[in-house]
Amino acid sequence: MKRIFVFTILFIITTALFSQSDPMQEVINYFTQGKTLSEKGDYQNALPLFKKALNIYTTNFSNEDETAGILYNWVGLVYYNMGEYEKALEYYFKSLTIYEKILGKEHPNTASSYNNIGSLYYTKGDYVNAVSYLNKAVTTYEKIRFSNIPDANKVEFFASILFSYQ
């Protein structure tokens, strides 16, 4: 009987020691699950996973680094795909603010944020803001010489359409 008790105590201690959660692994797990659901169009279930990943990351690491920017962007993307444009803009702008501060205005992630914001404004029919942000995206892509990136070509296409409305 003593052996079973000692074994049980050792098992509990060992389990407690080795089951300590790794916050970064949790972020990765929630992000991966959210991305999988998002790619399937299941935005309602993806959103809480992305938000949980964001919350764990910003609580344990930073709310102003590139990874935080990526997570804010994904939450914004899900809101965009759900048609909740104001919430999407809120997260897109958080992402953009981080990218501009940490990576600078001439970085592919910053250009991608300009593109996301411009595309959202375009979807809302706000062509003035759409042109402004899509123009920033095109200009940034050109400055960093990534004009051969497919996104840059898409941005140029949308920008050319929007410029025709001016």
Image (cartoon, grey):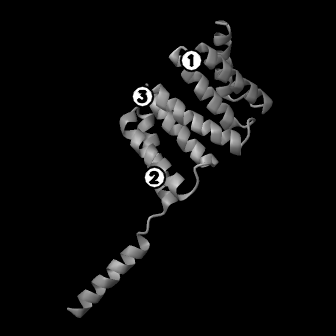
The quadrant in which the N terminus is found is bottom left
Looking at the image, the residue that sits furthest to the left is 1
Looking at the image, the residue that sits furthest to the top is 165
* Residue name at image x 38 percent, y 78 percent: 14
Residue picked out by circle 2: 29
Question: In the structure shown, which secondary structural element does the residue marked by tag 1 occupy?
Answer: helix
Which of marks 1 and 3 precedes in the sequence?
Answer: 3
| 6 shown above or below 108 | below
Q: In the visual, does 77 lie left or right of 101?
A: left
- Mark 3, mark 2: which one is toward the viewer? 3
Residue contact between numbered discs 3 and 1, judged by CB atoms under 8 Å: no
| 24 shown above or below 140 | below
- Mark 2, mark 1: which one is toward the viewer? 1
Question: In the structure shown, which secondary structural element does the residue marked by tag 2 occupy?
Answer: helix
Amino acid carrying label 2: it is Asn
Amino acid carrying label 3: it is Met
Residue picked out by circle 1: 122
Which of marks 1 and 2 precedes in the sequence?
Answer: 2
* Residue name at image x 45 percent, y 44 percent: 51
* Residue name at image x 63 percent, y 15 percent: 128
Q: What is the C-alpha distance between the residues marked 2 and 1?
A: 33 Å
User: Within 10 angstroms of label 2, few (less than 14), some, or many (20 or more) residues?
Assistant: some
Residue picked out by circle 3: 82
Q: Quadrant of residue 131?
A: top right
Looking at the image, the residue that sits furthest to the bottom is 2
* Residue name at image x 74 percent, y 29 percent: 140
Residue 5 image position (x, y, % from top left): 25, 87
Residue contact between numbered discs 3 and 2, judged by CB atoms under 8 Å: no
Which of marks 2 and 3 precedes in the sequence?
Answer: 2
Residue 162 image position (x, y, % from top left): 64, 12
Residue 28 image position (x, y, % from top left): 50, 52
User: Within 10 angstroms of label 1, few (less than 14), some, or many (20 or more) residues?
Assistant: many
